[in-house]
Image (cartoon, grey):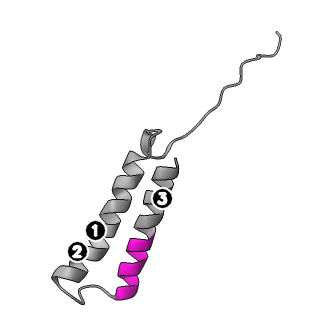
Amino acid sequence: MGSDSRQHEHCCPVFGVKSGGPIIGLGILLILFAIVPSILVPETMPAIIALFFAGFGIFLVWIGIAK
């Protein structure tokens, strides 16, 4: 009954995968949902909400690349 010398590193990746692909994809979608409506139909959504979506999308892309 000795101690187990192996250490089990338990990692819970986001979306069930270790790569940053899904996070980057979600970030790109958020950026597109912020930019495309503003270009096609101006004043569809308030600018502050579009900036929030685009900013969070950029953050997700950055996190996915840094992973």
Give the image location of residue 2, x and y in percent: 83, 11
Q: Residue furthest left?
A: 40
Residue interval drawn in magenta:
47-55
Q: Residue at x 28, y 70 (%)?
A: 33
Left or right of 38? Residue 58 is right
Q: Please name the amino acid that badge 3 sits on.
A: Trp
- Between discs 3 and 1, the one toward the N terminus: 1
Q: Residue at x 39, y 73 (%)?
A: 53
- Cα separation, mark 3 vs mark 2, equals 21 Å
For the residues bearing labels 3 and 1, Cβ distance under 8 angstroms: no
Identify the residue under disc 1.
32
Give the image location of residue 8, x and y in percent: 66, 26
Q: Please name the amino acid that badge 1 sits on.
A: Leu
- Cα separation, mark 3 vs mark 1, equals 16 Å
Q: Residue at x 72, y 19 (%)?
A: 6
Q: Please name the amino acid that badge 2 sits on.
A: Val
Residue 52 drawn above or below residue 24:
below
- Corner quadrant of residue 46: bottom left
For the residues bearing labels 3 and 2, Cβ distance under 8 angstroms: no
Residue 3 drawn above or below residue 41:
above
Residue 36 drawn above or below residue 11:
below
Identify the residue under disc 2.
36
Give the image location of residue 44, x and y in percent: 23, 86
Q: Which residue lies furthest to the right in this view?
A: 2
Quadrant position of the N terminus in the picture: top right
Left or right of 27? Residue 59 is right
Identify the residue under disc 3.
62
